[in-house]
Each structure stands twice: as C-alpha cells, then as structure tokens.
Amino acid sequence: MLHDSKAFSGFSVDDIEKAKAFYADTLGIDVGEENGMLRLKIAGGTPILAYPKPNHVPAEYTVLNFPVADIEATARELAGRGVTFEHYNNEQDETGIYRGQGPLIAWFKDPAGNVLSIIQE
C-alpha cells in the first residue's frame, strides 16, 4: 500500500527561528519555510520536516546523521562555527570524535537539544 510513497522524517523544535538560523547559517543546509514549519533540503532530495511544538522535549537519540568524507575537517569547521560536540562517558577524543567500534562519529545538538551527528563515510 505505501510501497511507492516518498516517506520523509520529521522532528520537533521549540523555536522555529532559532532552528532555521542554526540549520541554514551554522550547518549550511538549504532551509525552506512553509506553514510555520521548516523543510531541510538535504542531498538526495528527500526533505526533513522540523515542526514547532510548544511542549517540545529533545530527542534522546540521534534524529539526523550527516555522512561526511572527512570527519576531522568537518568537526573543525563546525567547531569554528560555534558547534559544541557532546562527550559521552569520556569516550570521544578532544575534538569530540568517537573512535571506538563502528564508524568514526561525533554528536552535537541543535538549539532545541535534539541530537545530530556527523559520521565518517
């Protein structure tokens, strides 16, 4: 029934204007706004919806992963733009990159407290 539906993901934020500035200006994503919601236009063409929610509670899991070719360079650039990387159980290096099992990954939060990551391709 939904086999041919072009599904997309969404998550809530507590302040649309702060989210728009973060995703557009800090992360450099093309952001559209429609009906009071944001559409993050990412590579591949499937948009991601960010919608306002007055009683927003940040997700306790990663809502969005950004695959990157060079995680170290990307982490340095994001840090230079004011992004602070999360440190969980002291398992990340000084730049915030986790180098344990699995791919290299670094987590950070948007202004609403949702967890995002950059992950080495």
Image (tube, rainbow, N blue to C red):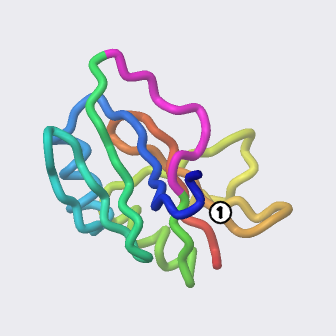
**Where residue 16 sits in the image (x, y, percent)?**
20, 38
- Name the side, left or right, on which 90 lies relative to 120: right
In this view, 68 is above or below 4: below
In this view, 66 is above or below 121: above
Residue at the spot 61% in from the left edge and 67% down from the top edge: 119
User: Is 75 in front, or is 55?
Assistant: 55
Magenta stretch contains residue 58: yes
Magenta stretch contains residue 53: no
Residue at the spot 68% in from the left edge and 41% down from the top edge: 88
Residue at the spot 56% in from the left edge and 82% down from the top edge: 70
Outermost residue to the top? 55
Q: Amino acid at mark 1?
A: Ile
**Where residue 60 sits in the image (x, y, percent)?**
58, 32
Which quarter of the figure is the C terminus placed in?
A: bottom right
Q: Residues within 10 Å of mark 1 (few under 14, many from 20)?
A: many
Outermost residue to the right? 101
Outermost residue to the front? 1
